[in-house]
Amino acid sequence: MYSNLLTNFCGLPVTDFNDVSDWQGVETAYRLRSEYNDQESIADRLKKLLSIPESAQLKSLIIGAWSEAYESGSNNTIDILINAAPKLPNLRSIFMGDITYEECEISWINQADMSPLLSSFPQLEVFRVRGGTGLAFSKIKHAHLTELGVETGGLSRSTIREIFQCDFPALEHLELLLGEPNYGFDGGVEDLQPLLSGKLFPKLKFLGLMNSQIANDIAAVVVNSPIVERIEILDLSMGTIDDEGIKSLLGLAECTNLKQLNVSHHYATPTTIEELKKALPFPVIADEAQDPNEEWRSVVHAE
């Protein structure tokens, strides 16, 4: 679960913006949020932010909790940002949903179609979104997006397919936090085949299929997939991978292009982890070892 708000985003320090007195220059990522029973909305705070002449040079913007995120989708907030887009021509990164579990559990966050927002910021390079309920990506081409992160406790099969139908020719970094069935994940490794085939996102270097309850299944198929022959970093962390999946990953030993494998938050035995580290010719990150004898195995971010 996400217990803390971001303190850094895209290399910039993060600060909450409530009033013009919070302005710290353009080398800051400003977070707009509206707490429970707050007298001001995100729209109010964005209006104040845009009233500052230098705001036209902003590089990064974060949207935190909005009023009743557990009931209301992000449609209104997206519309507000779309209307503000002409005043933010230099924006290069957006995070939609920097929300802690105390504000709203990740599986309760109601999102919307993100593609209209992406279309309104054609120069955007980094986009992250948290929350899978109602999350959609209508078909879109975005020429400059290099990083996409989708953080959910359960990513639906339909949303996965929508992401794969988008045309992101510059995409280098993709993170999909797949989650588990109790909170919205209803797919399988077959739904990842369009990506694993290597036909999507030709510039991809970082592939994260993370926070997954089917981590063992993913490990079994990714080792023989065309995509693994051209990426540099494979991240299978935050999930429920155990000895079975770790042994599958021994098949990566011949992948000379890979520079790093991350399987942190795993349920594998120390012996199997050591075997993997010795077999692979690149670094393996295997932190946050869980009890291999645990019967109920959870992903890091679920409810």
Image: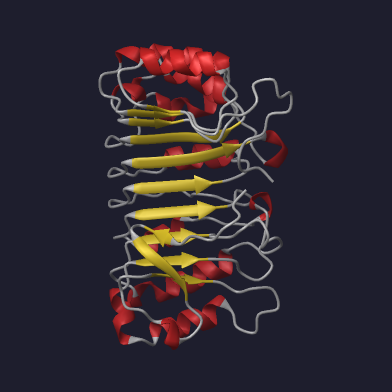
> Total number of numbered labels?
0
Colour setting: secondary structure
**Nearer to us in this view, 117 or 131:** 131
**Nearer to us in this view, 193 or 217:** 217
Would residue 210 appear left or right of 122 to someone viewing this image?
right
Relative image position of residue 178 (x, y in whole percent): 56, 37
Residue at the location (59% across, 26% down)? 214
Residue at the location (64% across, 57% down)? 110
Relative image position of residue 215 (x, y in whole percent): 55, 25
Residue at the location (49% across, 49% down)? 137
Quarter location, residue 100: bottom right
Relative to 38, residue 147 above or below: above
Residue at the location (41% across, 25% down)? 196
Relative to 4, residue 170 above or below: above
Relative image position of residue 212 (x, y in whole percent): 58, 32
Relative image position of residue 230 (x, y in whole percent): 28, 26
